[in-house]
């Protein structure tokens, strides 16, 4: 039985970086991964979808070329070539990661499923494809997988999830998307721009239900403007095959298509870890409960990334390993101290940090708010990208930002100017009086801040 200073189960966005960081400090590390290094992000998430998004955007801009005085003729999408470009980028990214980890002699990679066996004195014993390993420190980074709801008839049709969707090499004639949240909307818009008909079916009253109603309404409007059908307000009664098509029945809504994508959330990959053998606690869905320092209830075991419910994003997973490494070096960093920031990569994208307007209203704080339409931003007008809005929220008493939403051109980048500013704890007045660059979208932040008013 081999003994290591640390064992990492799962090689998502936290695992490899943590392994390399620990190894650089002279520790021996076992990194266990059953499928591919890089987790969802590199293999089925950020890397492939953002690569494919670019192909979709090029097609979209080409179709609008005449608006800019450019004539290109009929625009045709080579779907297979776009998918091949995407796969090339995945292979390159994965290969670079494998070379990086493989070049560190203190890291031993086990390509197998990892799970706890129990304890051996002060050590934890882990099984890695039949090999027994032990260590006093274990880090879990096993990520999540698609949640498939128990919809009648769904198991009887060839449904797609975010993984199998990216394996397609023939363009769907009509893609039905069950779920009106981030993955479903991003992929729905991408496939619409690549030439598929697309229908989004959201059982709730509106898409992007986590966002404020004005943001949700704007997203609905620009998706419908591109020809995406959005059906909301009815739970899904049944999915069935009919004459070679797939039919989704949701109350009065009946959608018929050639393919169906299920994008209804994620489940943690903790069920195969045998956590009970060492006493690690989870919630009812299998997510691991952790402290701000990412510690589980069992000393010596940490949980990082999507399985700890502290973000479920690539950037939060990577940030988790930074916290752990810093604390092992004597620091006192905590995930409790970070303000959540994320983006939805529709086009235009949505950038969000901190509280939404609805959350701010429910907070009991004295909140100031200002909103500004992208159609009034000069750079957006020059780019003919005037869809969207900016919403800024600050605490009237502390003068600190409590949240922001930027839906529009470069919203995924602009939101980070706000989130990084929030990390300083500075007054919003500092940003209002700062010198911006013209012509940019971000230069309007001081102008918008000058319009702050109390929430009514």
Image (spheres, grey):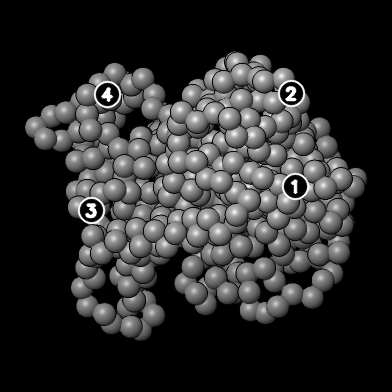
Q: Report which residue position mark 3 lands on.
A: 169
Q: Report which residue position mark 1 lands on.
A: 325
Residue sitting at x 40%, y 36%: 263
In space, the residues marked 2 and 1 are separated at their CA atoms by 22 Å
Does the rendering let one see residue 39? yes
Asked where in the image residue 148 lies, by quadrant, the reply is top left
Numbered circle sitting on residue 420:
none
Outermost residue, right direction?
397
Residue sitting at x 56%, y 64%: 410
Label whose residue precedes the other's in the sequence (2 or 4): 2
Q: Nearer the viewer, residue 19 or 346?
A: 19
Mark 2: secondary structure: loop
Mark 3: secondary structure: loop
Q: Say which of marks 2 and 4 sits in front.
A: 2
Quarter of the image with the N terminus in it: top right
Q: Say which of marks 3 and 1 sits in front.
A: 1
Circle 3: is it few (<14), some (14-19), or many (20+) Cα within 10 Å? Answer: few
In space, the residues marked 2 and 4 are separated at their CA atoms by 45 Å
Q: Is residue 325 left or right of residue 243?
A: right
Q: Report which residue position mark 2 lands on.
A: 122
Asked where in the image residue 296 lies, by quadrant, the reply is top right
Quarter of the image with the C terminus in it: top right
Label whose residue precedes the other's in the sequence (4 or 3): 4
Percent position of residue 375, x then y: 55, 65
Numbered circle sitting on residue 155:
4
In space, the residues marked 1 and 4 are separated at their CA atoms by 43 Å
Task: Tell me whether circle 2 and circle 1 mark residues in contact (CB < 8 Å).
Answer: no
Task: Tell me whether circle 1 and circle 4 mark residues in contact (CB < 8 Å).
Answer: no
Circle 4: is it few (<14), some (14-19), or many (20+) Cα within 10 Å? Answer: few
Does the rendering let one see residue 180? no
């Amino acid at each position: 039985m081999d003994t290591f200073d640390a064992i990492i189960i799962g090689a998502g966005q936290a695992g490899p970086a943590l392994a390399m960081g620990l190894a650089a400090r002279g520790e021996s590390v076992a990194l266990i991964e059953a499928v591919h290094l890089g987790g969802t992000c590199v293999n089925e998430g950020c890397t492939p979808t953002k690569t494919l998004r670019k192909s979709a955007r090029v097609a979209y801009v080409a179709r609008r070329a005449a608006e800019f005085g450019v004539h290109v003729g009929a625009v045709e999408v080579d779907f297979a070539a776009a998918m091949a470009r995407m796969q090339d980028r995945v292979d390159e990214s994965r290969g670079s990661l494998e070379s990086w980890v493989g070049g560190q002699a203190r890291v031993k990679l086990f390509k197998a499923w990892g799970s706890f066996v129990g304890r051996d004195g002060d050590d934890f014993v882990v099984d890695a494809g039949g090999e027994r390993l032990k260590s006093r420190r274990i880090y879990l980074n096993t990520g999540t997988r698609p949640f498939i709801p128990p919809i009648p008839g769904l198991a009887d049709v060839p449904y797609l999830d975010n993984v199998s969707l990216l394996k397609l090499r023939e363009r769907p004639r009509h893609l039905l998307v069950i779920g009106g949240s981030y993955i479903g909307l991003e992929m729905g818009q991408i496939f619409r721009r690549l030439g598929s008909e697309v229908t989004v079916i959201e059982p709730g009253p509106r898409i992007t239900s986590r966002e404020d109603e004005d943001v949700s309404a704007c997203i609905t409007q620009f998706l419908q403007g591109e020809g995406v059908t959005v059906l909301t307000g009815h739970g899904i009664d049944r999915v069935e095959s009919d004459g070679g098509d797939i039919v989704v029945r949701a109350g009065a809504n009946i959608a018929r298509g050639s393919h169906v994508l299920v994008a209804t959330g994620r489940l943690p990959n903790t069920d195969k870890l045998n956590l009970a053998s060492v006493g690690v606690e989870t919630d009812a869905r299998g997510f691991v409960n952790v402290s701000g320092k990412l510690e589980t209830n069992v000393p010596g075991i940490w949980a990082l990334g999507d399985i700890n419910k502290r973000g479920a994003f690539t950037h939060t997973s990577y940030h988790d390993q930074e916290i752990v490494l810093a604390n092992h070096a004597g620091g006192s960093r905590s995930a409790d101290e970070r303000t959540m920031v994320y983006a939805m990569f529709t086009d235009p994208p949505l950038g969000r940090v901190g509280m939404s307007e609805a959350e701010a209203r429910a907070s009991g704080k004295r909140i100031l708010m200002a909103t500004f339409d992208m159609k009034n931003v000069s750079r957006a007008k020059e780019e003919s990208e005037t869809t969207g809005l900016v919403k800024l929220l600050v605490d009237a008493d502390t003068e600190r930002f409590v949240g922001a939403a930027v839906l529009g051109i470069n919203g995924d980048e602009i939101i980070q100017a706000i989130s990084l500013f929030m990390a300083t704890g500075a007054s919003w007045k500092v940003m209002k009086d700062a010198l911006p660059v013209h012509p940019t979208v971000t230069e309007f932040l001081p102008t918008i801040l000058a319009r702050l008013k109390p929430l009514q």
